[in-house]
Image (tube, rainbow, N blue to C red):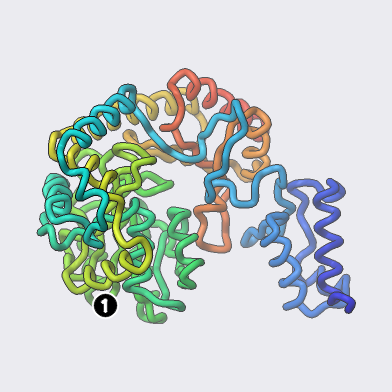
Amino acid sequence: MAQPRYKELVDTLAADIRSGHLRAGTRLPTHRQLASAHGLALVTATRVYAELAAMGLVSGETGRGTFVREISLPPRQGIDQFALAAGMVDLNFNYPALPGQADLLRSALRQLAASGDLESLLRYQPHGGRQHERAAVARHLASRGLKVGWEQVSLVNGAQAGLAATVMALLGPGDVVAVDTLTYPGFKVLAEACRLELAPIQASGQGFDLDALERLCRTRRVRAVYVMPTLHNPLGWVTGAQWRRQLVSIARRHGLLIIEDAAYAFLADKPPAPLAALAPETAVYVSGFSKNIATGLRVGFVVASAESMKAIERIIRATTWNTPGVMTSIACAWLDDGTVERLEAEKRRDAKIRQSMAAEILAGLNCVRHPSSYFVWLPLSHEVRADQVAAALMREQISVSTAEPYATSHHVPHAVRLALGSVELDVLRESLETVRRVISGYAY
């Protein structure tokens, strides 16, 4: 059976892009021009570009048009974890580690082996974690301004699993979730898998526009809001106390669930109280130990009201049953003996050193950053395309992310995100100098 005519056009354009006949950065005809040139309905022309975008070959930019994408970049660069080629410098993902952490793990494993607790670790654990471990997390949270009982805490397989359990337990397909126009890619992936509708809210200073959220709630049935109030990824802001109080007021007025992602919160010095402390009845707080201890540990936690926690624990039971006891034992022992507190302090100092280096080397470029975060956001000038910069850096053996994985609206800004925490300082310095050289080369 012959394939539809629009499919033939998709195949033709895809072949022209892959062969280099249509070069990266080429502006393609508008949807109306494409429809007119090929005798298609406008909706069919839109479908042609949608299929090419799904193949990672083009990107649409609101107000500018549809452009050929730099196809030397993996289609899900900045979203999925790929095995990097030997010699490739990873400024894409953050997995900050400090000297001596491997020795800490060796010591912890020896202590665990000698503790006499091994028999219990061979058995199933309670879905939300053992009581003494949940209590250890609750004590840790009290130092962050969030005072909760152990029964309001569940242990999960990392913060991403905590977000997944929260969404699966408390939201459903078709629910509208308000988000920043630039947000954590892992939540976008989760929303797609759970068929949530993301409603982007424009930024207004340090945080999204609360008036815009209010208007959205009056015109749409918004079910939840997903926020990173303490050290936003990728923009690095820490929202003020007044902004947080106003958001809580809106959430209560419109019955919104607040999903508070605090993965990087430990890097901020004395931030305002968490949203979950201001609105414990409607906010779910999610964080973990990937950034402050180690990404391979895969232990996180969720804090929620008693009613919400019942639903979340049912999802944990349905998906993972429990977080592995060996991992939770190590993490909670480090909470109790002060290791986590010490690592967090050392990583704050380390992040400040890296940010100072970035500020020095990238001076003169538009640079959005927090002084103690592990990432930098670089908006590019109007004549510079982010995918071409990322591809050029990949040829220099440096992997970075563009704005595409973070964007929740049709407008994808030309910007790159640099993760600063995954390489040695001398490698980071050399890589940042290369980033500056490449961006400057495209700008002039």
Q: Is residue 160 left or right of residue 77?
A: left
Q: Is residue 386 above or below residue 182?
A: above
Question: Observer-nearest residue: 185 or 378?
Answer: 185
Above or below — where is 93 with respect to 405? Answer: above
**Residue lying furthest top:** 426
Q: If the image is split into quadrants, where does the C terminus sit?
A: top right
The residue nearer to you, when weighing 31 against 337, is 337
Question: Is there any visible trace of residue 145 in the rendered image?
Answer: no
Residue 269: x and y in percent read 22, 38
Residue occupying image coordinates x 80% and y 46% = 23
Q: Amino acid at mark 1?
A: Gly
The picture quadrant where one finds residue 253 is bottom left
Q: How many marks?
A: 1
Q: Residue at x 46, y 78 (%)?
A: 174
Q: Residues within 10 Å of mark 1 (few under 14, many from 20)?
A: some
Q: Position of residue 128 (x, y in %)?
A: 23, 60
Q: Residue furthest front?
A: 119
Q: Position of residue 228 (x, y in %)?
A: 33, 54
Residue where numbered disc 1 is placed: 255
Q: Is residue 318 left or right of residue 118?
A: right
Q: Residue at x 31, y 66 (%)?
A: 317
Question: In this orientation, does residue 328 appear?
Answer: yes
Q: Residue at x 71, y 56 (%)?
A: 58
Q: Quadrant of residue 199?
A: bottom left
Quadrant (top left, top right, bottom left, bottom right) of the N terminus? bottom right
Q: Is residue 269 left or right of residue 351?
A: left
Residue 106 x %, y %:
29, 28
| Label 1 residue SS | loop
